[in-house]
């Protein structure tokens, strides 16, 4: 099993960690106040922080992340207005992170699920599905295997270029939840 380090201790971090631990993966967490001082021992590092915090995490760890798979779960929303994304048009948070971490395999995952649907492993009676985008097949397979072992479905969503569409989907889902058009225990389901 892969070893995971989750940077963050919020609801998404604990929900993701719960799924991974349920599948037998080794999971360690780094809290906000530990960023830069706590070791990153996992082979896979999950950035379970808001997008505005990613820069500080990358700066704090620098070369200590080299060679690791980095999973970006962020939705780069304008959190003041909830009406736009804050990355350049046609880009994605994952692409911006990958540009800063050229010695890593960056994956986009978990941004189209809510913490409640990860914890319950269900969306409207359908098994929660994690969509995974990335350019390295082995890294995607490692994450998919760990997620499936934890009782959640996983679908390969294509190359890291697909992160753009995944972030648009995450943006839509979040704005629907904020406007109370859907609940935080709801969301989009993938039926196969």
Image (cartoon, grey):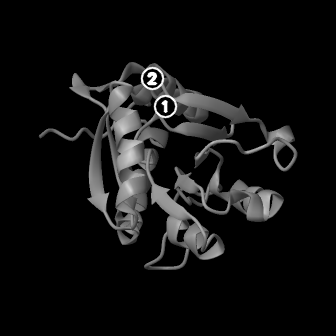
Tell which of 58 and 178 is nearer to you: 58
> Quick check: marks 2 and 1 in contact, CB under 8 Å?
yes
Q: Residue at x 56, y 59 (%)?
A: 77
- Name the one closer to the observer, 102 or 88: 102
Res 10 label? none
In the rendered view, would you say 71 is above or below 98? above
For label 1, count other residues whose C-alpha is less than 10 Å away and answer few (under 14), some (14-19) or many (20+).
many
Residue pictured at 84% horizontal, 50% vertical? 36
Q: CA distance from mark 2 to mark 1?
A: 6 Å
Residue 81's quadrant in the figure? bottom right
Circle 2 sits on which residue? 119
Give the residue drawn at x 79%, y 41%.
Answer: 32
Front residue of this view, candidates 137 and 108:
137
Query: Which residue is denoted by mark 1 in the rendering?
Result: 115
Where is residue 39 shown, x and y percent of the image? 79, 43
Q: Is residue 100 left or right of residue 75?
A: right
Is residue 85 visible in the rendered image? The answer is no
Quadrant in which the C terminus is drawn: top left
Instruction: Specify whether 154 is left or right of 43.
Output: left
Left or right of residue 170: residue 191: left
Q: Where residue 47 sits: x, y (%)?
A: 62, 49
The crowd level at tag 2 (other Cα within 10 Å; few <14, some 14-19, many 20+) is some
Compare residues 167 and 134 and report the one nearer the observer. 134
User: SS of the residue at dot 2?
Assistant: helix
Q: Residue furthest bottom?
A: 89
Query: Residue 164's image quarter?
Result: bottom left
Residue 144: image location, x then y, percent: 35, 43
Residue 130 appears at what percent x and percent y?
A: 35, 42
């Amino acid at each position: 099993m892969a070893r995971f380090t989750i940077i963050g201790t919020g609801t998404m971090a604990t929900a993701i960690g719960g799924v991974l631990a349920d599948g037998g993966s080794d999971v360690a967490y780094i809290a906000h106040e530990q960023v830069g001082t706590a070791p990153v021992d996992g082979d896979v590092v999950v950035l379970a922080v808001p997008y505005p915090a990613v820069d500080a995490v990358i700066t704090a760890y620098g070369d200590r992340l080299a060679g690791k798979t980095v999973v970006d779960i962020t939705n780069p929303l304008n959190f003041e207005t909830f009406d736009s994304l804050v990355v350049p048009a046609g880009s994605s948070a994952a692409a911006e992170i990958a540009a800063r971490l050229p010695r890593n395999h960056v994956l986009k995952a978990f941004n189209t699920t809510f913490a409640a649907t990860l914890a319950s492993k269900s969306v409207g009676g359908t098994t929660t599905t994690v969509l995974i985008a990335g350019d390295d097949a082995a890294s995607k397979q490692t994450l998919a295997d760990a997620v499936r072992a934890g009782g959640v479905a996983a679908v390969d969503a294509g190359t890291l270029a697909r992160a753009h569409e995944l972030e648009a989907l995450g943006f839509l889902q979040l704005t629907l939840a904020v406007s109370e058009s859907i609940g935080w225990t709801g969301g989009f389901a993938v039926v196969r």
